[in-house]
Image (cartoon, rainbow, N blue to C red):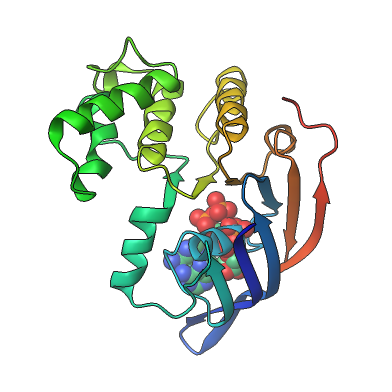
């Protein structure tokens, strides 16, 4: 079953009188439960593609169907609704609220979903436990290591049970040992049936994914199955 269908996606940016062609004609299907890495040099279009996949931006032309729904031409409000209900985001910078505890940070998306406080707390505790932070729930971000902060961010991304988990350079701020721990966690999340798409420019990180897509100058240069994923 397809979760992502991209058909001839084009994205142009206007800069003054110039037009930058960030994506030229990208067509791509991703199935439920896949674990995909998107690679490519700086400027190849990775962020642009992620922004479109994450419904943070819309294509100039082409069709994007996410989880059976055409999201190519939605209004900003409808896009925001799709983001909140269908997509979990993990970033290079963890984007946690500094004054709130790990538990409160993870509970936050559930406030918007209209879930009662007692249930929010219970769900957040369960998710934090799943990412290995059962003894860090009351800590604030500055009382946590980089790897722990990223685990909080991952728990927050997963709490709404999104159809799709998008990660943009998730290990960009972490040393290699901690990055490997985060990749182990991603492997667990994948094994539980989640769909993961991550952007990385590091080969060592990409080879954890089961499929690797390389972009070059706004086009797909290659799309290969990784026969030997690390976990
Ligand atoms: P990366 O995804 O490689 O970490 P960025 O997405 O931050 O990097 O930027 C990639 C390229 O896109 C850079 O050359 C940057 O100058 C350009 N870029 C990103 N955002 C903008 C913007 N809002 N306006 C103009 N250029 C941008
Ligand atoms: P990557 O993430 O692979 O570095 P991007 O998607 O950020 O690539 O950028 C692709 C191309 O689009 C680059 O030439 C970049 O400079 C340009 N670009 C990206 N974002 C913007 C923007 N907001 N305004 C103008 N140009 C942009």
Question: Residue most toward the front?
Answer: 1
Measuring from the top left, give residue 24's x and y in whole percent. 68, 77
Looking at the picture, how far across and down is residue 179, in whole percent? 58, 25
Measured along the vertical axis of the image, is residue 80 above or below residue 32? Answer: below
Q: Is residue 99 visible?
A: no
Does the rendering let one see residue 46? Answer: yes
Residue 198 in the image, given as x and y percentages of width and height: 59, 45
The foreground one among 135 and 11 is 135
Which quadrant does the N terminus fall into? Answer: bottom right
Horizontal side of 30 relative to 114 (left or right) equals right
Outermost residue toward the left in this view? 117
**Near-viewer residue (81 or 22):** 81
> Which quadrant of the rendered structure holds the C terminus?
top right
**In which quadrant of this rendering is ligand 2 seen?**
bottom right
User: Image check: 100 left or right of 202?
Assistant: left
Counting the numbered discs, the total is 0
Taking depth in this image into account, of 168 and 71 the one nearest to the observer is: 71
Which residue is outermost to the top?
135
Considering only vertical position in the picture, is 103 above or below 62? Answer: above
Q: Quadrant of residue 110?
A: top left
Percent x, y for residue 84? 33, 54
Task: Tell me the residue at 32%/63% (across/down).
Answer: 80
Question: Which residue ends up furthest to the right in the rendered image?
Answer: 227
Residue at the (57%, 32%) spot, across then down: 192
Q: Is residue 19 above or below residue 52?
A: below
Residue at horizontal 21 percent and vertical 27 percent from the top: 121
């Amino acid at each position: 079953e397809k979760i992502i269908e991209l058909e001839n996606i084009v994205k142009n940016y206007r800069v003054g009188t110039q037009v930058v062609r960030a994506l030229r004609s990208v067509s791509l299907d991703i199935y439920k439960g896949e674990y995909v890495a998107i690679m490519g040099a700086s400027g190849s279009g990775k962020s642009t593609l992620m922004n479109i996949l994450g419904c943070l931006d819309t294509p100039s032309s082409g069709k994007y169907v996410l989880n059976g729904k055409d999201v190519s031409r939605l209004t900003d409000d409808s896009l925001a609704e799709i983001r909140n209900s269908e997509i979990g985001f993990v970033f290079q910078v963890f984007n946690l609220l500094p004054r709130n505890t790990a538990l409160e940070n993870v509970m936050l998306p559930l406030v918007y979903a209209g879930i009662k406080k007692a249930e929010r707390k219970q769900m957040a505790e369960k998710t934090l436990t799943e990412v290995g932070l059962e003894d860090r729930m009351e800590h604030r971000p500055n009382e946590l290591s980089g790897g722990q902060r990223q685990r909080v961010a991952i728990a927050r991304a997963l709490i709404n049970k999104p159809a799709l988990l998008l990660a943009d350079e998730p290990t960009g701020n972490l040393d290699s040992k901690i990055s490997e721990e985060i990749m182990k966690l991603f492997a667990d999340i994948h094994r539980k049936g989640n769909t993961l798409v991550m952007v990385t420019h590091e080969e060592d990180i990409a080879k954890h994914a089961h499929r690797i897509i390389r972009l070059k100058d706004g086009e797909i240069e290659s799309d290969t199955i990784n026969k030997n994923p690390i976990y």
